[in-house]
Amino acid sequence: MSQSHRGPLVVLPVVACIALAGCGSALDRLNEVGQTPKLSAIDDPTTKPGYKPVSLPMPTPESVAYAPNSLWRAGSRTFFKDQRARRIGDLLTVKVTINDTAQVANETKRSRTTADTAAINGLPGSLVKQVIPKSVDTGSLIDNASTTTSDGNGSINRSETLTTNIAAMVTQVLPNGNMVIEGKQEIRVNFEVRELIVAGIVRPADIASDNTIDSSKIAEARIAYGGRGQITDLQQPRYGSQVIDVLMPF
C-alpha cells in the first residue's frame, strides 16, 4: 500500500475516537440543560482513585516520658484539654491568603561575526597546483564569513489575590507527628459552582490555639481554586477546537 493511501487510514481511527469522546461529553451536557450543576458527594478522600498515603523521611522514634502526677500536659497550650486537631478525622480551619505580584522584564541580544581565510603559497602551493584545476587560486583556498544576530524580549506582569477560609480534615498522621490534611469546599450560585481544594502537611506546633493555620505554613501545599457551570463552560473553547489546536503542526 502506498504512503498516500496509508495516511488517511491512520487518521480515521483517531478522528472516530475524538468524535465518540466529544459525543459523550455533549450528551452529558445535554442531560444537564436547564439544571444546576450537581455538587460532589461527601466521601472519604482516602478512598478516591489515585489516592496515595504520603511517605517522607522520618526521624528515629523517641521514647515518651509520662508524668502521671503532673497537672500540665506536655504540648498543650491551655490548662484544660487541647482542642487543636491531632488525630485522623479531626478538623482544622485553613486561612488561605494568597497575594502574589510578579513583574519581570528580560531582553537578550547576541551578535557574532566570523571570518576565515586560508592560503597555500610557496613550494606547497606549487605542488597543490599540480592536482587542482588551474582556475583555482591557492592564495584563497578558504574564504568563509558568517554573521549571527539574535534579539529576544519577554515580560511578565501578574497579580493574584485570594483570601478565604476552609475547613480541612486530618487524613493521616505521620510517624514524626506531622499531619496530612485535605479539604474541599463547593459553593453554588445560580448555575455556577466554585470549588476550593486545599491539601498538604502541617506541623502541630503551627496550629494556633483557635485551631486555625495559615496556608503559608502548609508544607507540600496544593491549593486549587476554580469552578464549573455555564460561565466556565462558555469561557472554554469547544473540544473540537482544542483537538485541532493539539494536532495541527503549524
Image (spheres, rainbow, N blue to C red):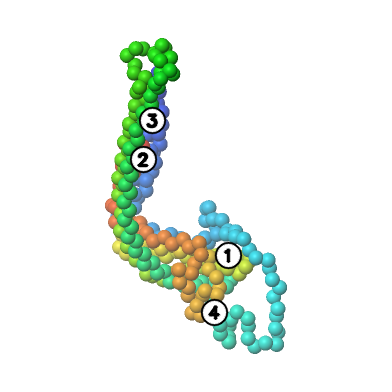
Label ID, residue 246: 2
- Could you tell me the amino acid type at mark 1? Gln
Where is residue 183 drawn, in percent x and y?
Answer: 47, 65
Residue highlighted by disc 1? 172
Residue highlighted by disc 3? 11
Which numbered disc, 2 or 4, marks the residue that appears first in the sequence?
Answer: 4
Which is more toward the observer, 122 or 239? 122
Is residue 220 shown above or below 234? below
- Could you tell me the amino acid type at mark 4? Gln
What distance separates the C-alpha of mark 4 from that of mark 3?
62 Å
Asked whether disc 2 touches disc 4, contact meaning CB atoms under 8 Å apart, the reply is no
Label ID, residue 182: none
Give the image quarter of residue 249.
Answer: top left
What distance separates the C-alpha of mark 4 from that of mark 1?
18 Å
Asked whether disc 1 touches disc 3, contact meaning CB atoms under 8 Å apart, the reply is no
Is residue 218 shown above or below 139? below
Asked whether disc 4 touches disc 3, contact meaning CB atoms under 8 Å apart, the reply is no
Q: Residue at x 31, y 56 (%)?
A: 105
Residue highlighted by disc 4? 83
